[in-house]
């Protein structure tokens, strides 16, 4: 859950507890009873879904590690085959293109390239074995490809479970918040004149605001002199018997590089 959902969930818990504490005051109002029940159901749904999300997140990390390890083993095996193919290419240069690999391929691209290399290596199995590769190197390659594909699939499924749990949390929080908005009218009407109970309700109903986004930095305006009409500028030109002002004199408070 993000910070907004957590704070609304905490508010829903307080409202649920308030409804349980003040149950007798609202027992005669069926709508209030049903609305407090909706809040309690929303809290239970959030807690249940958050627990599922936590388990899914832990499993996702484990399967991510497993997928990374499966990819590493497959890449190592492909590098061995490619190195041996370069030796075979001394007699058959056309083999170099058949065993090329892209640099840092994506997962699905790696699977496709590995399948192609397996297909190219199968007819040349004897030549590869003659260069000290294992007799089962093609079968080992196919097994590593299958393991990597399964690891990709498991990680994808867990990623979908995580997204589904997040959506479930958002919906449960939204349902509970809608019920609280209805209680915003019921509770003050019922507790009119009961200042201590109303204070408890306001405290339970309060949602802490999220930190505001970074404020815009205030940049002061540059000290640029105003433009003057040409006629005024002509009048201010220095005459022969009047000392001229230095051409690069900087007005007070102005940065020199703006006055140049």
Image (cartoon, rainbow, N blue to C red):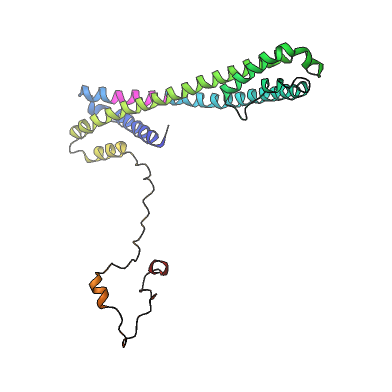
List x then y, in percent, for residue 145: 63, 17
Name which residue lies at 28% across and 38% down.
200
Instruction: Locate residue 32, reporting x and y percent.
Output: 23, 25
Residue at x 23% of width, y 27% of height: 26
Q: Nearer the viewer, residue 132 or 228?
A: 228
Count of numbered circles in the view:
0
Image-based side of 130 in relation to 187, left or right: right
* Residue 50 horizontal/vertical position (percent): 44, 26
* The image quarter in which residue 25 lies: top left
Is the stretch drawn in magenta largely helix, strand or loop?
helix
- When the figure is inspected, residue 13 is found, relative to residue 222, above or below; the finding is above
Position of 191 compared to 80: left or right?
left
Quadrant (top left, top right, bottom left, bottom right) of the C terminus:
bottom left
Image quarter of residue 127: top right
**Bounds of the magenta segment:** 36-48
Q: Residue at x 34, y 82 (%)?
A: 244
Residue 134 shows in the view: no
Say whether residue 195 is visible: yes
The residue nearer to you, when weighing 161 against 50, is 161
């Amino acid at each position: 859950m993000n910070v907004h959902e957590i704070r609304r969930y905490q508010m829903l818990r307080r409202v649920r507890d308030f409804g349980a504490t003040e149950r007798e005051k609202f027992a005669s109002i069926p709508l209030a009873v049903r609305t407090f029940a909706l809040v309690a159901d929303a809290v239970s749904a959030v807690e249940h879904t958050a627990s599922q999300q936590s388990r899914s997140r832990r499993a996702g990390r484990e399967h991510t590690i497993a997928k990374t390890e499966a990819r590493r083993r497959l890449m190592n095996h492909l590098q061995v085959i490619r190195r041996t193919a370069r030796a075979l290419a001394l007699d058959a240069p056309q083999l170099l293109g058949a065993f090329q690999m892209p640099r840092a391929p994506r997962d699905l691209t790696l699977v496709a390239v590995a399948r192609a290399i397996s297909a190219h290596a199968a007819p040349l199995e004897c030549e590869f074995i003659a260069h000290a590769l294992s007799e089962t190197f093609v079968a080992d390659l196919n097994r590593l490809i299958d393991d990597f594909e399964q690891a990709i699939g498991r990680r994808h499924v867990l990623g979908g479970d995580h997204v589904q749990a997040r959506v479930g949390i958002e919906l449960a929080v939204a349902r509970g918040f809608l019920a609280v908005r209805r209680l915003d009218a019921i509770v003050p009407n019922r507790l009119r004149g009961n200042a201590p109970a109303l204070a408890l309700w306001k405290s339970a109903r309060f949602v802490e605001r999220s930190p505001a986004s970074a404020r815009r930095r205030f940049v002061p305006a540059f000290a640029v002199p105003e433009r003057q009409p040409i006629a005024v500028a002509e009048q201010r030109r220095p005459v022969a018997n009047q000392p001229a002002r230095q051409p690069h004199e900087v007005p007070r408070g102005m940065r020199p590089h703006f006055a140049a």
